[in-house]
Amino acid sequence: MKSFCLSLGVLCFVLFSSCSKEKKEKETIKIGSKKTETKSKQEKTASVPVLLDNKGIGPIKSISFQKTIDQTLAAKGEQLFKSKCLACHKASQKFIGPSMTGIYERRSPEWVMNMIMNPDEMLKKDPVAIALLKAYNNTIMLNQNIPEEEARAMVEWFRTLE
């Protein structure tokens, strides 16, 4: 019953949000004294900053990627993404939430893992997460209590999408 209600809610949101599609060119916004470019094709409302030094709020302070992608871990991450995230995210296109393709051009790996693992606090305190919330019609990212090992597998898979 719970999943039926969630599915019905997602369907209603998709129907209502699909009515307005705006196209904006790439623009520059100013945050503090830094100029920051937004990815308008990915985040069409253009008010979402690209801050690659932002690690987000949560337990992940540092991630080191190996030079080569761990294909076993990435395959696990792909399956986890498909089972937990596909209702709101598509790998290569904007949907209810942002696309994962090229995510590391817009966000640090630590930020991505903290958003996966700690969306409640991120949406309250992190400036980029707050901007994304506004850009995606105040649609919150549900906290699915994803453990670190699963989040790490997903961020490894995101590397294959670039």
Image (cartoon, rainbow, N blue to C red):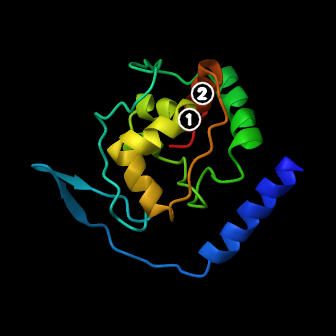
Q: Distance between the residues labelled 2 and 1?
A: 6 Å
Picture coordinates of residue 2 (x, y %)? 84, 48
Whether the residues at callouts 2 and 1 have beta carbons within 8 Å, the answer is yes
Residue drawn 40% across and 30% down? 57
Q: Is residue 98 above or below residue 51?
A: below
State the residue at coordinates (62%, 38%): 143
x, y percent for residue 12: 72, 70
What percent of the width, then of the height, locates residue 66?
Answer: 47, 17
**Element on which disc 2 rests:** helix
- Residue bearing the label numbered 2: 151
**Residue 22: where, in percent of width, then height?**
46, 79
Q: Tell me the residue that label 1 is attached to.
A: 116
Mark 2 or 1 closer to N-term? 1
Question: Farthest residue in the left direction?
Answer: 33
Amino acid carrying label 2: it is Ala
* Residue drawn at point x = 39 percent, y = 68 percent: 45
Q: What amino acid is labelled 1 in the image? A: Ile
* Label 1: element kind: helix
